[in-house]
C-alpha cells in the first residue's frame, strides 16, 4: 500500500531522542524509521510513556531529535534553525490539540487566520480563507464570536479550520476528541473522515482503540520503538488515492 | 523576503503595523484595569516632568524679565540709609543724617571709569500728591530727561521733559500710569496740574509704571504712584535736606542722589566696570550707605539657579520614569507567564521568536506611550490651572511634552525588551504544556 504512493511526505530515518537529567539518560525514542505518504490517515497508538507525544513533537517540528534525519516534504528539518523551523511549521503543518488551544482574545475569524498572519498573508486573503473554512466546518454564523462563547465541539471545529488555513502537507492531531463528549467527538471524527476523503494527510495520536475503524494505517509504539505497523480498517482508501 | 524580517515588515507595511498594534490593544483591553494602573506610573511621571518644567521655566522667565527691565548694560547705584550703630560719633550728635551717593562719587566715576555712556542720577521723596481734592501717596522723583530711556519706561501719552526744561528749572511733570489711574480716573491728565505741598506741576506726559504696565485699568494698588519732575526743579523746591516725621520728632536726612544709573557702552565689560565702580565707592564711603545692583550679574545668578533647578527636575523625572518602567516590566513579566500557553500556540502555528518579541514590545510601548500621552495632557493642563488660579507665570515649552513623551516610549522599550525576550525564548513544547 505504502509502496503504491509516489514520494513520502514524511520520512523519519532512525530518529532518536534522549533526555539527560543529571547523570541519568532516558531514551524516549530509540531509533524510529517511518514513511508517511500523501492521503494517509495514520493513527499512532501505544501505552503512556511509549514516546507518542515526543514523536508528535518531533513530527510537529516543535522539538529537534537528538539524532536521525527527518524529511518533511523533502526538506531535512533536523538541521534547521529556530526561524526556519517556525517557517516549516507554518507552511507544512496543521496542529489540532486536545484542549483546542484557541487564543482567547481573538474572534473565530481571527483565530482561523493566525497561521496565515505569520505566513505574511494580506487582510483580504485572511478574511476570504477564514470565511470559507468556517463555512466548511459549519461555523459561518459564529465568525465574530470569541472562543469562550463556543461549545467544546465548536472550538475544536475552529481549531480544525485553523489547521487547514495554510493548506499544510500534514495535519497533526493530539487526542483531538479527548475533551469532548461522545456526540461531539463523533462529529469531529466524521469531519476528519471527510478531510481524509478529500485527500488530506492526517496523523492522529491517540490511545482510543476505536480509531482503528476510521484510519488507513495504525502504528503502534512500545518503549520508544516501532512495535507494529499495520493497515487500518479504511486502508482501501489509499489504494485508490484521490488527487490531493 | 519581508516576511522573514518582522521588524522591517512592521516598519514598511502600514497594514501590518496596524494589525500588530490592534492586536496589542486587544490584549491590553482584555485587562483594562491592570493596564490602566500600570500606565498610571508613567502618566504621573510624565505629567510631573511637564508640569514642573513649565512652572520652573515660568519662574525663571519672570525673574529674567524683571532683571532685563533694569537694563542689561546698566549698573544701578542706590543710596541706603546706614544702620544706626554704624553711624560715626560725629553723625550721631548731628541733627541731620547725611548719607548716600554724592556728586563727588558720580564725578569720580565719570572721570576714571572708561566706556561709560550716561550717568543718570535721580532723587526721590515720598509725598502726598493732590489733584484738587483727590490725593494719593506717591514718590516725587527728580530726574534727567534721559530717565525713560535708561529705565526702559515707555511714553504712553504726551512727552517727557526736555533739557531745556531741566536747564530752566520749570515746574513740569510726567506721571506714571498708576498715578493717572488714582488721580484722573475719568479724564485725560495732559495739560492739567498737580500739587505737592505748595508747588504746582503741569502734566506734560504719561509714562509706564515700574513693572512695565501701560494700561491704567490694569494698574493695581500695589504699584507706587510716581511723579517725575526735572532734577533741577526738585533741588530748588525741596532743597538738599529732607525732613520726615518720626516718632518723637523730626528726622532730617541729607541725600544728594537716591539713585544713579550708569550705562556701560560695551556689554561684555559690564562686570569689570562694576568692579571698578565698587572700588571707587568703597574708598569714598566709610559707611555702608550705598548699594550697587548689576542686572547682568543677577541674570547670571538666575541662570545658575535655573541650571540647578533643571538638574533636580531631571533627576526627579528620571526616578519617576524609572519607577514607572519597573512597574511596566513587572506587569509584562506577569503577563508573559500568564500567557505562556498563548505564546506556545503562536509558536506552534509558525510565529518566529522575533514575532513574539515584536508582539510583547508593541504592548509595552503602547502601554507606556498611552501613559505618556495621558501624562502630557495632564502635565500641560496643570500649569494652565496653576497660572489661572494662583496667578503664577508658567511657560510650557514646545520641546518639554515631546521630550517627556519620547522618554516614556524609550522607557517602554527599555523595560519591555527583557520580558519580550523571555517570552520569545520559551520552549514551544513546554509552553504548550503550560496550564
Image (cartoon, coloured by chain):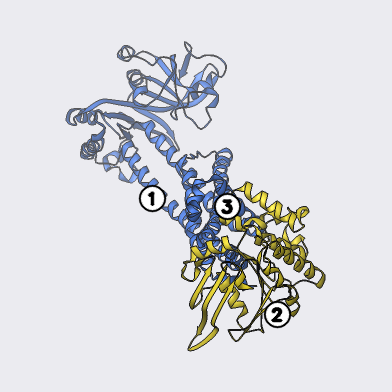
Chain colours: A yellow, B blue
* Circle 3 crowding by C-alpha within 10 Å: few under 14, some 14–19, many from 20: some
Labels 2 and 3 touching (C-beta < 8 A): no
- The answer to whether A178 is drawn above or below residue B401 in the figure is below
Residue B301 in picture, x, y percent from top left: 34, 44
Q: In the image, residue B377 lies at what x, y percent? A: 57, 44
Return the x and y of residue A123 as percentages of the image width and height.
Answer: 62, 48
Q: Quadrant of residue B356?
A: bottom right
The Cα atoms of the two marked residues, 2 and 3, are separated by 40 Å
Q: Chain of mark 2?
A: A
Residue of label 1: B308
Residue at 52%, 78% (x, y): give it: A15
Numbered badge on residue B297: none
Q: Which residue is mark 2?
A: A207
**Chain letter of the residue carrying label 1:** B
Q: Quadrant of the C terminus of chain A?
A: bottom right
- Which residue occupies 37% across, 22% down? B148
* Quadrant in the picture for the N terminus of chain A: bottom right
Query: Looking at the image, is mark 1 or mark 3 nearer the viewer?
Result: 3
Amino acid at each position: 500500500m505504502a509502496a503504491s504512493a509516489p514520494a513520502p511526505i514524511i520520512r523519519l530515518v532512525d530518529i532518536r531522542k534522549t533526555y539527560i537529567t543529571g547523570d541519568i539518560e532516558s531514551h524516549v525514542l530509540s531509533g524510529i524509521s517511518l514513511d508517511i505518504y500523501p492521503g494517509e490517515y495514520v493513527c499512532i497508538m501505544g501505552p503512556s510513556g511509549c514516546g507518542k507525544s515526543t514523536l508528535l513533537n518531533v513530527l510537529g517540528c516543535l522539538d529537534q531529535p537528538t539524532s536521525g534525519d527527518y524529511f518533511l516534504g523533502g526538506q531535512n528539518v533536523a538541521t534547521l534553525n529556530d526561524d526556519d523551523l517556525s517557517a516549516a511549521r507554518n507552511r507544512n503543518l496543521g496542529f489540532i490539540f486536545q484542549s483546542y488551544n484557541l487564543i482567547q482574545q481573538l474572534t473565530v475569524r481571527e483565530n482561523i487566520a493566525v497561521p496565515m498572519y505569520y505566513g505574511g498573508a494580506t487582510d483580504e486573503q485572511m478574511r476570504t480563507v477564514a470565511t470559507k473554512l468556517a463555512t466548511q466546518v459549519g461555523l459561518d454564523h459564529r465568525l465574530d464570536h470569541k472562543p469562550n462563547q463556543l461549545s467544546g465541539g465548536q472550538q475544536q471545529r475552529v481549531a480544525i479550520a485553523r489547521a487547514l488555513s495554510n493548506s499544510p502537507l500534514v495535519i497533526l492531531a493530539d487526542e483531538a476528541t479527548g475533551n469532548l463528549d461522545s456526540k461531539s467527538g463523533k462529529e469531529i471524527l466524521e469531519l476528519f473522515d471527510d478531510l481524509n476523503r478529500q485527500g488530506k494527510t492526517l496523523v492522529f495520536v491517540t490511545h482510543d482503540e476505536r480509531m482503528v475503524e476510521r484510519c488507513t494505517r495504525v502504528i503502534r509504539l512500545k518503549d520508544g520503538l516501532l512495535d507494529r505497523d499495520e493497515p487500518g480498517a479504511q486502508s482501501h482508501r489509499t489504494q485508490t488515492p484521490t488527487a490531493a | 523576503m519581508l516576511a522573514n524580517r518582522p521588524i522591517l515588515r512592521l516598519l514598511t507595511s502600514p497594514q501590518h503595523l496596524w494589525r500588530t498594534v490592534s492586536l496589542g490593544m486587544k490584549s491590553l483591553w482584555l485587562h483594562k484595569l491592570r493596564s490602566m494602573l500600570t500606565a498610571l506610573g508613567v502618566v504621573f511621571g510624565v505629567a510631573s516632568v511637564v508640569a514642573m518644567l513649565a512652572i520652573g521655566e515660568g519662574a525663571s522667565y519672570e525673574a529674567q524679565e524683571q532683571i532685563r527691565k533694569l537694563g542689561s548694560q546698566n549698573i544701578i547705584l542706590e543710596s541706603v540709609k546706614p544702620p544706626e550703630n554704624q553711624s560715626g560719633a560725629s553723625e550721631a550728635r548731628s541733627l541731620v543724617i547725611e548719607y548716600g551717593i554724592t556728586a563727588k562719587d558720580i564725578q569720580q566715576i565719570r572721570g576714571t571709569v572708561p566706556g561709560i555712556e550716561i550717568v543718570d542720577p535721580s532723587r526721590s521723596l515720598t509725598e502726598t500728591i493732590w489733584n484738587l481734592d483727590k490725593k494719593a501717596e506717591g514718590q516725587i522723583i527728580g530726574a534727567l530727561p534721559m530717565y525713560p530711556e535708561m529705565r526702559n519706561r515707555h511714553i504712553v501719552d504726551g512727552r517727557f521733559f526736555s533739557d531745556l526744561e531741566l536747564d530752566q528749572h520749570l515746574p513740569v511733570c510726567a506721571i506714571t500710569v498708576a498715578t493717572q489711574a488714582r488721580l484722573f480716573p475719568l479724564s485725560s491728565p495732559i495739560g492739567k496740574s498737580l500739587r505737592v505741598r505748595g508747588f504746582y506741576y503741569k502734566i506734560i506726559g504719561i509714562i509706564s509704571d515700574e513693572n512695565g504696565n501701560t494700561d491704567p485699568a490694569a494698574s493695581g494698588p500695589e504699584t507706587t504712584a510716581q511723579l517725575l519732575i526735572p532734577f533741577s526743579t526738585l533741588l530748588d523746591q525741596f532743597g538738599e535736606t529732607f525732613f520726615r516725621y518720626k516718632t518723637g520728632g523730626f528726622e532730617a536726612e541729607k541725600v544728594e542722589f537716591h539713585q544713579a544709573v550708569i550705562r556701560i557702552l560695551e556689554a561684555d565689560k559690564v562686570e569689570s566696570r562694576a568692579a571698578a565702580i565698587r572700588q571707587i565707592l568703597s574708598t569714598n564711603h566709610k559707611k555702608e550707605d550705598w548699594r550697587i545692583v548689576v542686572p547682568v550679574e543677577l541674570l547670571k545668578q538666575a541662570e545658575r539657579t535655573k541650571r540647578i533647578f533643571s538638574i533636580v527636575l531631571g533627576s526627579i523625572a528620571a526616578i519617576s520614569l524609572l519607577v514607572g518602567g519597573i512597574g511596566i516590566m513587572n506587569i509584562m513579566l506577569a503577563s508573559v507567564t500568564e500567557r505562556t500557553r498563548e505564546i506556545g500556540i503562536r509558536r506552534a502555528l509558525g510565529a518566529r521568536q522575533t514575532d513574539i518579541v515584536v508582539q510583547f514590545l508593541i504592548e509595552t510601548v503602547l502601554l507606556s506611550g498611552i501613559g505618556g500621552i495621558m501624562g502630557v495632557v495632564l502635565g500641560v493642563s496643570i500649569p494652565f490651572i496653576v497660572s489661572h488660579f494662583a496667578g503664577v507665570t508658567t511657560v510650557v515649552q514646545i520641546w518639554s511634552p515631546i521630550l517627556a513623551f519620547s522618554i516614556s516610549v524609550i522607557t517602554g522599550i527599555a523595560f519591555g525588551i527583557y520580558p519580550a525576550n523571555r517570552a520569545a525564548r520559551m520552549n514551544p513544547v513546554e509552553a504548550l504544556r503550560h496550564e
